[in-house]
Image: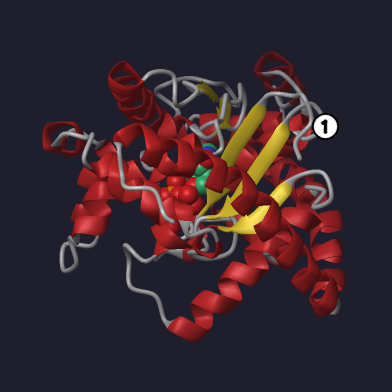
Amino acid sequence: MLDDKKTIFSGIQPSGFVTLGNYLGAINNWIKLQNDYNCFYCIADLHTITVRQEPAKFRKTAVELLMQYIAAGLDPEINIIYCQSHVHQHAELSWILSCFTYMGELQRMTQFKEKSQKHSDNINAGLFTYPVLMASDILLYQTELVPVGEDQKQHLEITREIASRFNKIYGDVFKIPEVYIPKAGARVMALQDPSKKMSKSDENANNTVAIMDKPEIIMSKFKKAVTDSENEVRFSETKPGVSNLINIYCAVTGNTIEQTEKEFSSGGYGVFKKAVGEAVVAKLEPIQKKFYDLQNNKDYIDTIIKNNTERASYVAEKTIRKVKKKIGFLPKV
Ligand code: AQP
């Protein structure tokens, strides 16, 4: 079923159009790794319902996320790209692993603290146990490497903790995964407020660049991006807006910080912001074109979903069967 390669798992929530943050922090790396690993990339829809979703829009966003994966360059023939809720073993393993996770561990999670502040009217138990579901996603496929943005590092640590705890009791059931964080683009910040990360669900549209934004919108968002009063393109902790733009430019062009500082040593912020916008537009244009082509090819998308769900389920079932046996559940007859 799988080649004799190491396994990768990662996913994105269908909570809106993929942002430049999701793209540079996650998908761009997935593409680089796709030929060298057995890769599982899911549409993390079980995670998404920790925040209320409107059903029709949610369905549309999920299928559009799949199309964005493919349009960005993930090959659905070699990668297993599927929808999390189609593989029931995710939820099953999540329950089991929740019995091996401590409340104190979950209480320490930064994302829980941030998201419960943001959604203070709906602090549900799913938001709290989110890291257990994420651990289950990863461990279900005997994953060795998890390419994610910087914000997910803590969730990877708890995944390793849960897996080691389980293995200590029952033997070597799960592989212990390593995190893989990109050098450039690991943490893309909001354009209007570089103290927080760029997020799909940000209420201020000018904070976020979606990979499907039209070129003129992208240019205008970069033009409005917050900088500082120095007019000097220099990477520094004291210059979060400019440093964020340098980071984006480097991730998109492959240039180093030093090359970028040198390239824009004269001309000021106006010239620099325009160049960042243009580099992003050039990177995203082919992705957008492919996405629109896929929109007209529903049968192809349905076939991908069907085939890849079967491939993912086969591997997931092998792990869950082993887990249940080790725990001592009565076997089915
Ligand atoms: N700003 C970011 N910079 C770099 N990487 C990022 N990622 C997210 N934001 C950035 C990476 O994208 C992957 C998928 O994230 P997710 O959709 O599962 O959840 P999230 O981290 O909560 O993403 P968003 O965009 O912030 O969604 P909402 O607004 O719905 O909460 C992960 O690998 C993440 O590291």
Percent of width and height locating residue 48: 41, 62
**Number of numbered markers:** 1
Q: Amino acid at mark 1?
A: Asn
Q: Which residue is drawn at the image coordinates 69% and 28% (left, top)?
A: 250
Q: Residue furthest bottom?
A: 56
Q: Which residue is drawn at the image coordinates 25% and 48% (left, top)?
A: 129
Residue 199 visible in the snapshot: no
- In the foreground, 258 or 35: 35
Tell me if mark 1 has few (under 14), some (14-19) or many (20+) residues whose alpha carbon lies within 10 angstroms of its own.
some
Tell me if residue 94 comes above or below residue 200 in the rendering. above
Tell me if residue 60 comes above or below residue 16 in the rendering. below
Percent of width and height locating residue 157: 36, 24
Q: Which residue is drawn at the image coordinates 44% and 56% (left, top)?
A: 333
Residue 174 falls left or right of residue 195:
right
Residue 77 falls left or right of residue 90:
right
| Label 1 SS | loop
Q: Residue furthest front?
A: 333
The quadrant in which the N terminus is found is top right
Q: Which residue is drawn at the image coordinates 55% and 25% (left, top)?
A: 181
Place residue 125 in its image quadrant: bottom left
Tell me if residue 164 comes above or below residue 245 in the rendering. above
- In the foreground, 80 or 276: 80
Residue at disc 1, CB closer than 8 Å to ligand 1: no
- In the foreground, 277 or 292: 292
Place residue 247 in its image quadrant: top right
Residue underneath mark 1: 35
Q: How is the model colour-coded?
A: secondary structure
